[in-house]
Image (cartoon, helix red, strand yellow):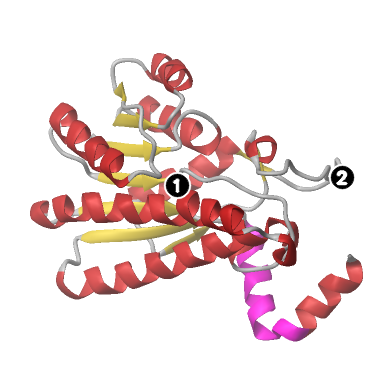
Amino acid sequence: MVKHIVITGASGGIGAALAIQLGAAGHRVALAARRERELQAVATRIGSGAIVIPTDVTKRIEVERLRDRAIAELGHVDVWVNNAGRGITKAVLDLTDDEFDLMMTVNVKSALYGMQAIVPHFIGRGRGQVVNVSSFLSRVPFATYRSAYNAAKAALNALTANARVDLARAHPGVHVTLVMPGLVSTDFQDHAVGGSPRLPPSTPAQTAEEVADAIVRAIEHPVAEVYTSPQQKAVALKYFEDVGTFEREAAARG
């Protein structure tokens, strides 16, 4: 069955890879981001199944406009993917108010705006799915230099879980899925506030296409949460079994 899917942060990285995979499978996709030229390039690769809607998702009015245009041009929306995000390189004790507010706005409020915009449409139709793209770092403090980004994604996790429980009570046809990638080989590192530290070449990373594969599976068969790398879930479980020991060992390793 062809689905109509809105993807934010679709101008590159995971969002673009997801859009291309979904388009290749015959789904119709609405591509949203601030960079129109890059969106057009992704749409060209997809063909007639894609529409471009330049959007600044940090502004509620633009997210609502995105919803209205997607519904007008596609007829309805089946899935809304909140994928827009940005990182930072700054330790907790060094964060400024503006840096922290930026991380919360880009990584949390944009998704909140998306959920609040589209879920009434899903409730009216009796079905639909929100997919919120978070991060493995929201669960395990491996990259402490990401500080406020990690905190923002943890906040996104909580909003996602609470929305999922609320909707399950009265609207079981509306699904809410949390996706947690680890390190991904995209330009995300380059666009982080303050840049990114150079990682050893042997550092394991997934491709954007591998993460997109996991999201496609979660759209085909909705689930509550997805760790895109098989090892991540085991590490997260180990962390929560004994937080103190895990963190002392991580600190010792540097």
Q: Residues within 10 Å of mark 1 (few under 14, many from 20)?
A: many
Tell me, for residue 215, which label it has, or none: 1
Q: Is residue 68 left or right of residue 205?
A: left
Residue 200's label in the rendered image is 2
Task: Give percent across and percent down for residue 237.
Answer: 63, 76
The percent coordinates of residue 249 (x first, y second) are 85, 76
Residue at (48%, 28%) from the top-left corner?
11
Residue occupying the point 21% across, 41% down: 77
Name the residue type under label 1.
Answer: Ile
Is 75 on the left-hand or right-hand side of 5?
A: left
Q: Which residues are magenta?
A: 230-244
Residue at 29 percent of width and 38 percent of height: 62
Q: Is residue 193 left or right of residue 221?
A: right
Specify the quadrant of the image occupied by residue 46: top left
The residue depicted at 31 percent of the width and 30 percent of the height is: 29
- The dominant secondary structure in magenta is helix
Q: Position of residue 159 (x, y in %)?
A: 39, 67
